[in-house]
Each structure stands twice: as structure tokens, then as C-alpha cells.
Image (spheres, rainbow, N blue to C red):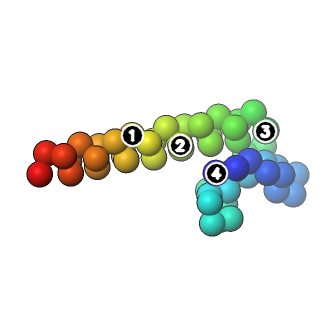
């Protein structure tokens, strides 16, 4: 994921170049990116735990 300028705003893009969210301020886009990545990592860890339990 990356944060890049989008018109007069800041956008968070996924690894495929699709916009995930748009924020007015860069610091808010960076925070959104951080939270999305943390969420995705948590889901990944939970899936790994489920696989190990099987």
C-alpha cells in the first residue's frame, strides 16, 4: 500500500493501484494506511491460527 497525491487530496492505494480511501490531509492518509495494514495483518494471523488448528 502507498499514499499518493490525488487531485487536491491524499489517497491510499492498494498493491494493484486501486484507491482504498481518500483523505484531505496527508497525515490522515498515512494513519488510514497504517490502520488498514494492521487490520490486514490481524486477519492474516487469525487465518494462520485457524489453519494450524486443523
Residue drawn where x is 28% and y is 49% of the image: 47
The x and y percentages for residue 1 are: 64, 51
The x and y percentages for residue 26 are: 79, 39
Q: CA distance from mark 1 to mark 4?
A: 16 Å
| For the residues bearing labels 2 and 3, Cβ distance under 8 angstroms | no
Is residue 15 or residue 22 the one in the foreground? Answer: 15
Which residue matches tag 1? 42
Q: Earlier in the sequence, mark 2 or mark 3?
A: 3
The x and y percentages for residue 50 are: 20, 48
Which residue matches tag 4? 1
Task: For residue 4, say whether it is visible.
Answer: yes
Which residue matches tag 2? 37
Task: For residue 21, say whether it is visible.
Answer: no
Q: CA distance from mark 2 to mark 1?
A: 9 Å
Which residue matches tag 3? 26
Relative to 14, is 41 above or below? above
Amino acid at each position: 500500500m502507498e499514499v499518493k497525491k490525488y487531485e487536491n487530496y491524499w489517497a491510499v492505494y492498494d498493491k494493484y493501484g486501486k484507491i482504498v480511501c481518500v483523505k484531505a490531509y496527508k497525515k490522515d492518509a498515512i494513519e488510514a494506511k497504517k490502520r488498514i495494514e494492521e487490520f490486514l495483518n490481524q486477519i492474516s494471523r487469525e487465518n494462520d491460527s485457524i489453519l494450524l488448528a486443523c
